[in-house]
Image (cartoon, helix red, strand yellow):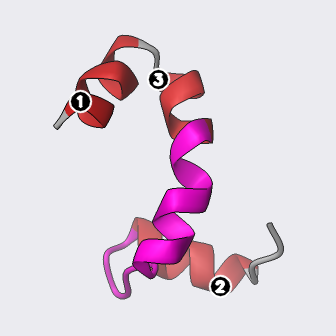
Amino acid sequence: MEKDPATISKWCTNKAQPSLETIKKIAPTIISKYGQWGEKWRKQ
């Protein structure tokens, strides 16, 4: 996924939020990286 580092920084500081489409694209990475937390999040 090609995103400008400034965009990622805004997401991390909550100055902007990614679109739902972007969240769906990055969700598998979050789930695999954070293990059980990711599994719990996916079930909600």
Point out which mark residue 6 bears.
2
Q: Tell me where residue 10 appears, x and y as whole percent.
A: 47, 81
**Image quadrant occupied by the C terminus:** top left
Where residue 43 is drawn, which disc sits there?
1
Mark 2 or mark 3: which comes first in sequence? 2
Look at the image and give the residue range highlighted in magenta: 13-28
**In the rendered structure, does residue 3 fall within the stretch colored magenta?**
no
Callout 2 amino acid: Ala
Q: Is residue 36 left or right of residue 7?
A: left
Q: Which residue is mark 3?
A: 34
Q: Is residue 22 shown above or below 16?
A: above
Q: Nearer the viewer, residue 24 or 35?
A: 24
21 lies above or below 44: below
Q: Amino acid at mark 3?
A: Tyr
Cα separation between marks 2 and 1: 30 Å
Q: Amino acid at mark 1?
A: Lys
- Residue at point 52%, 38% (across, down): 30
Q: Alpha-carbon neighbours of circle 2 within 10 Å: few (<14), some, or many (≥20)?
A: few
Residue 12 falls left or right of residue 32 = left
Mark 3 against mark 1, which lies toward the viewer?
1
Q: Which quadrant of the view contains residue 37? A: top left
CA distance separating discs 2 and 3: 23 Å
Q: Nearer the viewer, mark 2 or mark 1?
A: 1
Question: Is 24 in the magenta?
Answer: yes
The residue at 26%/34% (across/down) is 41
Q: Which mark is residue 27?
A: none
For the residues labelled 3 and 1, the Cα–Cα distance comes to: 14 Å
Q: Residue shown at 38%/27% (left/top)?
A: 38
Secondary structure under the numbered disc 3 in the rendered image = helix
Q: Residue furthest left?
A: 44
Residue 28 to residue 2: above or below: above
* Residue 17 lies in quadrant: bottom left
